[in-house]
Amino acid sequence: MLLSPVDRLHQFEQLHRGLAQAGRFLTRPDLNSLEEGRHTIDGDTVFALVSMCEGKGRSGARLEAHRRYIDVQYCLTGTDLIGYCPLAQCVTVAEAYDGEKDVAFFADPALEWVSITGSTCAVFFPDDAHAPLGGEGTCRKIVVKIRV
């Protein structure tokens, strides 16, 4: 997991070039006017999902992990509280990996919680299980998916 100001994501390009692409997208001046749904950045290699989300609280947020994509999670409005646990420490599978949706869910508790709001984003790699929407209230969120 990585926390970063969104305008500094380009500094992590050595980890994956898609992080610089995500940073450029998330600092676009027209970001607030984007409609909900999928926005292509680089085909299926890098794309963004824009949505209005309702927080579920810590008890309602489930750990999830992806094998094929890195998640860059960013809130345009509101705040998201995201749980984190290293995937290697997730032992209780709630839903087995679905290759079509690229997600597995776990019933293990998050070990840490991070708050993302304003100019900060959270980056979750395939070995990072994360539980988004752990806060309360509504947030307008962008998740940039980067194929590994």
Image (cartoon, rainbow, N blue to C red):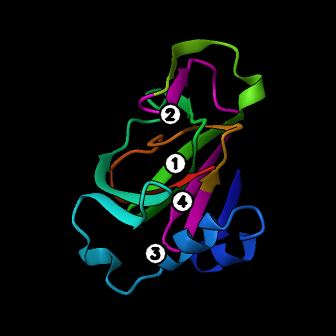
- How far is the residue under mark 2 from the one under mark 4? 14 Å
* CB atoms of marks 1 and 3 within 8 Å: no
Q: Which residue is mark 3?
A: 25
- How far is the residue under mark 1 from the one under mark 4? 6 Å
Q: Is residue 45 magenta?
A: no
Q: Which mark is residue 58?
A: 2
| Side of 62 where 48 appears, left or right | left
Q: Which mark is residue 81?
A: 1
Question: What's the residue at 42%, 59% (across, down)?
Answer: 47
* CB atoms of marks 1 and 4 within 8 Å: no
| Side of 49 where 79 appears, left or right | right
In what element is the residue under mark 3?
helix
Q: Which one is earlier in the sequence, the residue at label 2 or at label 3?
A: 3
Question: What's the residue at 44%, 43% (across, down)?
Answer: 133
Q: Which residue is mark 4?
A: 116
Along the viewing direction, whichever of 65 and 58 lies nearer the viewer: 65
Residue 71 point in image, percent of width and height: 55, 51
